[in-house]
Image (cartoon, rainbow, N blue to C red):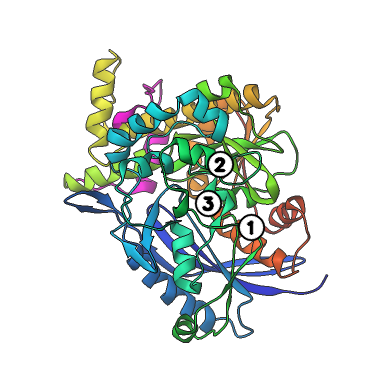
Amino acid sequence: MSVSVSVAAIDLGASSGRVMVGDVGPDRLDLRAVARFANEPVLLQDGLHWDPLDLYRHALAGLWTAVSQSPDGLGSVAVDSWAVDYALLRGDRMLGVPFHYRDERAAARGVERIHARVSPADLYARNGLQFLPFNTIYQLAADEIGDADRMLLVPDLIGFWLTGRMVTETTNASTTGLLDPRTRAWDLDLVSRAGLPASILTDLVGPGETIGPVSTHVGERIGAPGLTVTAVGSHDTASAVVGVPMQADDAAYISCGTWGLVGVELDAPVVTEEARAANFTNEGGVDGRTRFLTNVMGTWLISETLRQWERDGRPADLVEILRAAGDVTGPVTTFDVQDARFMAPGDMPARVQAWCAEHDVPAPADRATLMRSIVESIAQAFADALDAAERLSGRAIRVVHVVGGGSQNRLLCQATADRSGRAVLAGPVEATALGNVLVQARALGAVGGTLEDMRALIASTHELASFSPR
């Protein structure tokens, strides 16, 4: 195998987006960003929303740059994004602006409506998903579907605008709560029991399948008529797990960004009452694998704390405040980062103070101590999740791979090693984009045929930072 290809990844995160170009061959895996842009929520009268049109505009501009900087042309393009959120459509027209998963309507109305029809235990037995009040099934129950005839998750919406074809990719479909984790097909009986119209669901496609060529007007806009749009692990964590350079079965992963997704990769789902009680989820992975994981509050707490300090007129540089936090000596208070009070945007320092007061523990006295407390609390939550993943899956965990933006936070990586008692390997930062481009490259014949082959290529081309428990 000697073919090399260039492909583009539209990688949309919950706080920012990027268009990346990957140059991939048997011994080559180079990644470069050609566009980066913010993804800011928009608060309207009826709640918190996304702005998908702005994301699409940036994606098209990034694709134009990618094409212009790729003299040999692009082999394909693929989209990944955060999970659970969607647009409702009537025909080709989007109805309204998609809600943000942090909007409160699903928790306020959707959860009760679904659980009145399907008990939490029965729901877990059917879909294998951890309880999160913003799961798609709860959001749909809270919405007025009205005359919508299709629902498209965010990456599928972008794919539709690129190609004109409406499909739903399976790894992201597995986060809706409407997919059977064993068959990877829509659970139409569950859809009916939930009181939702099956007519809004589209055909499913798997990672590596072709969605179609870009529409004529898109091809003209980006300078690449007929460019192929390929399905990948369109849930960004599914692509990120492809990008984890795991070399043995004793490895776990933490895809660390706004959220920390902590888990192991398995061949089959674990749908037990114990797993439900521990709030572990079974989400679809590439090549039929199962991502057995739980959501832990990640760097959201850090970024929101920095934003609050900026709003207070006392901005702090992340690198400097983490250095100061690392110099804090003695024990610091750890708090429950999973407490619901930390979910919404707002004054995180004040919320930490309130949590400490309610639990009669010392509150951090200064900004460096507060940041150290946040880091140690996130690390403790990661350690607890790793212990649970090991117990529930029966898979021994000796090595933890931290990928994504959080892998650059050395203080957090060391704290995770210390509190979990396991070796931590940090990197690559752009695991999601790497997983995206590798699945495309495999579809084009540029890399080997297994996940292990692709991960070996990552391990041989990317340097990892190592942290040993102290």
Compare residues 245 and 158 and report the one nearer the observer.
158
Which residue occupies the foreground of this view, 278 or 91? Answer: 91
Q: Main secondary structure of the magenta part?
A: loop
Q: Nearer the viewer, residue 19 or 223?
A: 223
Query: For this view, does 53 lie left or right of residue 132?
Result: left
Q: Dot 1, how many residues are within 10 Å of its Cα: few (below 14), some (14-19), or many (20+)?
A: many
How crowded is the residue under tag 2: few (<14 C-alpha within 10 Å), some, or many (20+)?
some
Measured as percent of width and height from the top left, residue 288 is found at: 69, 47
Q: Say what amino acid the circle numbered 3 marks.
A: His
> Comparing marks 1 and 2, which lies closer to the viewer?
2
Q: Position of residue 253 (x, y in %)?
A: 60, 39
Q: Which mark is residue 235?
A: 3
Quadrant in which the N terminus appears: bottom right
Mark 1 or 3 closer to N-term?
A: 1
Q: Position of residue 233 (x, y in %)?
A: 59, 54
Label 1 – label 2 distance at C-alpha = 20 Å
324 or 71: nearer the viewer:
71
**SS at mark 3?**
loop
Quarter of the image with the C terminus in it: top right
Q: Which mark is residue 187?
A: 2
Q: Residue furthest top?
A: 360
Segment colored magenta: 314-341
Q: Which mark is residue 207?
A: 1
